Image (tube, grey):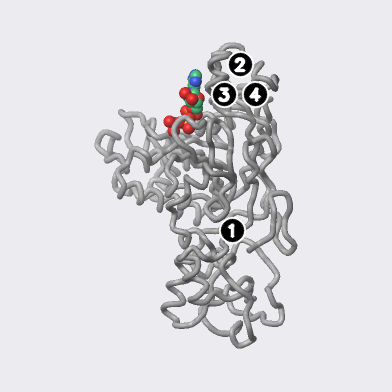
């Protein structure tokens, strides 16, 4: 088990990438004289129901702080009404925040004038909506090109760019159809392509797949994982679906009643729930799907053990490790930069499945509520590479003497 905490970076761990969005003490209160609520400790101490009864106000986002790091998929998860959409809309001021600060690449979003805001929404942080927002009389190609048209790009150039993106999201051959001639999944791909076409620094997804049937939804999730893997684009993804959050998120901010009750990697949220609410939320998640071999490994007992057996990257899940160990019939090595960090054997993997292992990973930002800043934790974005691709962070081997030079497969 790692001993890292929410405030520091463990020795030998790379610093997290720079933040794209930086949010501090953010409030959004709807209702009469909303501005007085964040500043009044008596009102901020009230429960949502009491606040509504006393003031007629709803605090949709309550004192939330976090960073979205470059290249990560940052998931905002919570039940209906927990404040997810309001929070994400505040990032580009589609909803005006009541209090707090928001910066994109260090630039104060709340200080932006109209034209700067327009630029932010068009070029820097494009939104993919649940209901697509497609123009019914335009073809797929022209819908995708729409954002480029708004930017003033010439017709030939924008259609060429749109055609590239249409192909990228798997819609080749459908360029000349209209939205009404497409399935729900295809329409969502058009929405995604339209956002991608403007090449934004961040893609914001507002529950984009919740209206899709389960199989198409899975396809679209895989599409997002693929795009993220290929492009490394920063993404903020709203969902109320835990499985979707665990599948897509490098980190997840779990919201309840406008607050972030826990912010961490899927492994941290499932392995170290911050409170009973989170614990109940994640109770049925199979541990082996989220616990990584970095958590499950033990030091290699000999140079022989460190030098043989299948190699796994530290971010591989226990499920992946079980497959590798079962195939090889021997313990697997956890490799980073050609060094053996430790090994996982059948016994250790089984104990994760059985729930007898200590799988509480490093806890990041698990302080309840958004009152304290939840950022700069230990974990940089979890790469979701296929096996054998570069791991997301570098650590010293458990026993440097046992280091080998092989890369994980
Ligand atoms: N314009 C508004 N005026 C008043 N209250 C609002 C407004 N918009 C949202 N709210 C309230 O703010 C709270 C958070 O709403 P929000 O839509 O952000 O939640 P959500 O988690 O995105 O929910 P869902 O998953 O159902 O979309 C809810 O109590 C909602 O009723």
Q: Is mark 4 within 8 Å of ligand 1?
A: no
Task: State the image quarter where residue 53 is shown.
Answer: top right
* Residue on which disc 2 sits: 34
* Residue on which disc 1 sits: 360
Task: State the image quarter where residue 136 is shown.
Answer: top left
Mark closest to the chain's N terminus, 3 or 2: 2
Local crowd at mark 2 within 10 Å, few (<14), some, or many (≥20)?
A: some
For the point 56% across and 49% down, the residue is 273
The outermost residue toward the left is 181
* Residue on which disc 4 sits: 44
Q: Is residue 177 left or right of residue 345?
A: left
x%, y% of residue 219? Answer: 35, 51
Nearest to viewer (mark 2 / mark 4) = 4
Q: Secondary structure at mark 2?
A: loop
* Residue on which disc 3 sits: 59
Choose between 335 and 199: the one closer to the eye: 335
Nearest to viewer (mark 4 / mark 3) = 4
Marks 2 and 4, how far apart at CA: 12 Å
Marks 1 and 3, how far apart at CA: 32 Å
Q: Is mark 1 within 8 Å of ligand 1?
A: no
Marks 4 and 3, how far apart at CA: 9 Å
For the point 62% across and 26% down, the residue is 27
Residue 348: numbered disc: none
Q: Is residue 392 left or right of residue 401?
A: left
Task: State the image quarter where residue 259 is shown.
Answer: top right
Q: Is mark 3 within 8 Å of ligand 1?
A: yes
Mark closest to the chain's N terminus, 1 or 3: 3
Marks 3 and 2, how far apart at CA: 9 Å
2 and 4 marks in contact (CB < 8 Å) = no
């Amino acid at each position: 088990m790692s001993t890292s905490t929410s405030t520091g970076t463990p020795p030998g761990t790379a610093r997290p990438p720079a933040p794209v969005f930086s949010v501090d003490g953010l409030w959004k209160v709807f209702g009469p004289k909303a501005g007085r609520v964040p500043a009044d400790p008596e009102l901020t101490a009230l429960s949502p129901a009491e606040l509504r009864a006393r003031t007629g106000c709803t605090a949709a986002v309550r004192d939330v702080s976090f960073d979205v790091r470059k290249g990560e998929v940052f998931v905002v998860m919570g039940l209906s009404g927990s404040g997810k959409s309001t929070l994400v809309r505040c990032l580009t001021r589609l909803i005006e925040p009541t209090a707090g600060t928001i910066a994109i690449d260090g630039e104060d979003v709340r200080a932006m004038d109209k034209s700067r805001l327009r630029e932010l929404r068009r070029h820097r942080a494009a939104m993919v909506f649940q209901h697509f927002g497609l123009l019914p009389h335009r073809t797929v190609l022209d819908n995708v090109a729409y954002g480029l048209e708004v930017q003033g790009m010439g017709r030939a150039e924008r259609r060429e760019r749109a055609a590239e993106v249409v192909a990228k999201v798997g819609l080749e051959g459908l360029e000349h159809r209209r939205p009404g001639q497409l399935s729900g999944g295809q329409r969502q791909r058009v929405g995604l392509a339209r956002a991608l076409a403007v090449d934004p620094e961040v893609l914001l997804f507002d529950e984009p797949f919740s209206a899709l049937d389960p199989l198409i939804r899975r396809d679209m999730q895989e599409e997002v994982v693929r795009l993220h893997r290929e492009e490394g684009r920063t993404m903020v993804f709203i969902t109320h679906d835990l499985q979707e959050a665990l599948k897509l998120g490098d980190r997840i901010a779990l919201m309840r009643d406008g607050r972030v009750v826990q912010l961490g990697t899927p492994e941290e949220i499932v392995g170290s729930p911050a409170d009973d609410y989170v614990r109940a939320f994640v109770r049925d998640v199979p541990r082996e799907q989220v616990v990584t071999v970095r958590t499950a490994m033990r030091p290699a007992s000999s140079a022989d053990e460190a030098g043989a057996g299948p190699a796994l990257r530290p971010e591989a899940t226990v499920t992946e490790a079980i497959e590798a160990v079962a195939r090889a019939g021997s313990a697997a090595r956890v490799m980073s930069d050609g060094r053996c960090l430790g090994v996982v054997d059948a016994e250790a993997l089984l104990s994760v499945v059985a729930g007898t292992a200590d799988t509480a990973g490093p806890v990041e930002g698990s302080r309840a509520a958004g009152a304290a800043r939840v950022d700069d934790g230990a974990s940089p974005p979890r790469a979701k590479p296929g096996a054998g691709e570069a791991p997301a962070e570098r650590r010293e081997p458990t026993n440097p003497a046992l280091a080998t030079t092989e890369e994980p497969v």
